[in-house]
Amino acid sequence: MTEAQVFERLNRIFRKLFDDDSIVVTRATTANDIEDWDSLEHINLISAVEKQFGMRFQMKEVSGMKNVGEMVDILLARATK
Amino acid sequence: MSIEIANKLEWPFDSEWILSNRRAIKRELSARPGLVTKKIAILGGSTTNDIAVIMSLFLMNNGIKPEFYQSEYAQYWQDAMFDNPELAEFAPDIIFIHTTSRNITAFPSMSDEKEAVDALLESQYDHFRVMWEKLAETYRCPIIQNNFEPPLFRLLGNKDVSDNRGRTNFIARLNMKLYDYAQTHENFFIHDINYLASSYGLDRWSDPGYWYMYKYALALEAVPEFAFSVASIIKSIYGKNKKILALDLDNTLWGGVVGDDGVNGLELGPETPTGQAFEEFQDYAKEMKQLGVLLTVCSKNDEENAIAGLNHPNGKLRPDDFTLIKANWNNKDINLMETASELTLLPESIAFIDDNPAERAIVRAQIPGAAVPEIGTVENYIRCVDHSRFFEVTAFSKDDLKRGEMYKANAERMKLERQYENYSDYLLSLEMKGEIQPFAPVYLQRIAQLTNKSNQFNVTTRRYTAAEIEALAEDDSHICLYGKLTDKFGDNGVVSVVIGKIDGKRLHMELWLMSCRVLKRDMELAMLDTVVEKARERGVEEIYGYYYPTAKNKMVKELYGFFGFEKQSEDGDGNTVWKLNTADYEKRCHVIEINGAK
């Protein structure tokens, strides 16, 4: 899977979750960039990403990711689908 | 799109789809007309945010738009026990206490003697009991309390369930105490997460990682199942249960087509696996009659064949078990609409079971609000209907047991009506006896149930909880009457409720409703006679009536005019105000014997 493909799938998840078709995430995107992305929505995001990519984040990863780029790196390493 | 969403929120639903599309679903559902707003306080022992969001979807799908109050994290007990201006101002219609086994603060230790375990059980129980009592006294609204799911681990393995020091055993005993409380307290409902967790699969039910990270007591994936279940209780409290189970026949109640295969060619009974499944489903449907569910047939068949099939020797359901049988070649949506209208119920009170996906699709498209589950194949029928919670029981009155008979008696009355040329002769022939009295304790539940169920003959459509009705019954500044009607065909039970507030020499009618099953029996006039009589006794000179239009109560738009009230005003929304002088009033009802006097 290429990084571009990961972003394409991530964008689909973000748009559906936040009900906003204009969202485009990049490596630098953080929770501050998307209005509704608060700590509670973060949980839903993590869960949706886990489902989509067939993997689980470790507890320390969930609290440690600084931006979407770090999430993408983990997905590139561990996604099973 | 809307039909599709409604169906996607019925069991069996796709939890993942609901979780990831929640915003779009919410946007769509919020736009629906006619939603009733209810204020729900969630007092949580763990994170409740997602539960509230997903619950709101299922509630809106049942016509209820919730507003939520949510405790700060795990503050359920403090919120309940100490002065809480925010919650008081919120004035909840319902309080839901979302606690789980994670909120049990102490379990027995292996060195405990029996007495110590018992004492611990009492103290854990008391922690909850004092909270319920405080909440009931402060907010006088229904309380929904989770029971406890099995524990995180079983130190004693299989013995954990039988040894009183085992957590499994301790939780089971604690749950029993909750049930005892529920049995002795009205307006207190157990949300059975112990069942839900086992039905869902205990290991999938909770996700320890989510607990450590986000303080989720259950896995995110399980939230829709959980929210659906709580929402079922809430919609039931507000009278949004289905009332009719309409059943197709061929391949729904038996295997095969009775018109083609003949009665002897049907698969029903112990001889084949499929036959067993149909027999058990018939048994299940028959059991539901006891809850007051009305069974009807909606089948494309000659009536003769339908009846023959229902008399199959291995069948459990007999023609007599059905309130109404529609076996003909009309479209099913038309038959179902007629079923509803003949039973004076709303089409959306139907749950329709049919094995044929094409028939289901038509009914779904033509009758919005009716439930048409994706029933699957016969071996799954019972599970599907049971999990759908169409008939979730909260209040269970004696009337429920007899409801099928009452509706049947109504059909007989209709037959008799045709024999009389003069309508009042017909009414007199019914030998009606009315009981119109101030609210009495035995009927409080039924009265509250009626205020939540009646949509058509209801001038203000005000909803009351059982607690509010109880408070009104004791309140001297109100005239509150229930009306019960019996005739030679049977007892109709409590069918009418009126509530008026006395203000000096004036009486303001806050509620006037009647069950449509006694329409055109002059029962409304009997109620009016009694209202005026009681009003005069209290020195009332003027009675004010109010009509607030809704999508469903057009039939009573002119009720007060018919009563002899004079219209005082009408605003742009069609709300009208009416007035009657009690001095000029003469008795209107001459066909019902009221409270033993002609």
Image (cartoon, coloured by chain):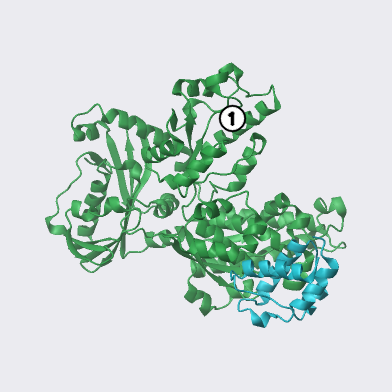
Chain colours: A cyan, B green
| Mark 1 Cα-neighbour bin, 10 Å: few <14, some 14–19, many ≥20 | some
Residue at left offset 71%, top offset 52%: B200
Please name the residue that numbered disc 1 is placed on: B251
Is residue B438 rendered to the left or right of residue A54? left
Image coordinates of residue B497 in percent, x first then y, are: 34, 52
Residue at left offset 16%, top offset 54%: B564
Task: Establish if B157 lies above or below B319.
Answer: below
Question: Residue B373 occupies which quadrant of the picture?
Answer: top right
Image coordinates of residue B52 in percent, x first then y, are: 59, 66
Task: Establish if B271 lies above or below A54.
Answer: above
Task: Establish if B527 lies above or below B460.
Answer: above
Image coordinates of residue B428 in percent, x first then y, are: 22, 34
Is residue B582 rendered to the left or right of residue A71? left
Q: Give the total number of marks visible in the rendering.
A: 1
Residue B563 seen in render: no
Q: Please tell me which residue lies in front, B362 or A41.
A: B362
Q: Quadrant of the C terminus of chain B?
A: top left
Residue B411 seen in render: yes
Task: Establish if B394 lies above or below B306.
Answer: below
Question: Residue B54 occupies which quadrant of the picture?
Answer: bottom right
Does dot 1 land on a helix, a strand or a loop?
Answer: loop
Q: Amino acid at mark 1?
A: Asn
Is residue B455 rendered to the left or right of residue A47? left
Q: Please tell me which residue lies in front, B329 or B72.
A: B329
Task: Report the chain holding disc 1.
Answer: B
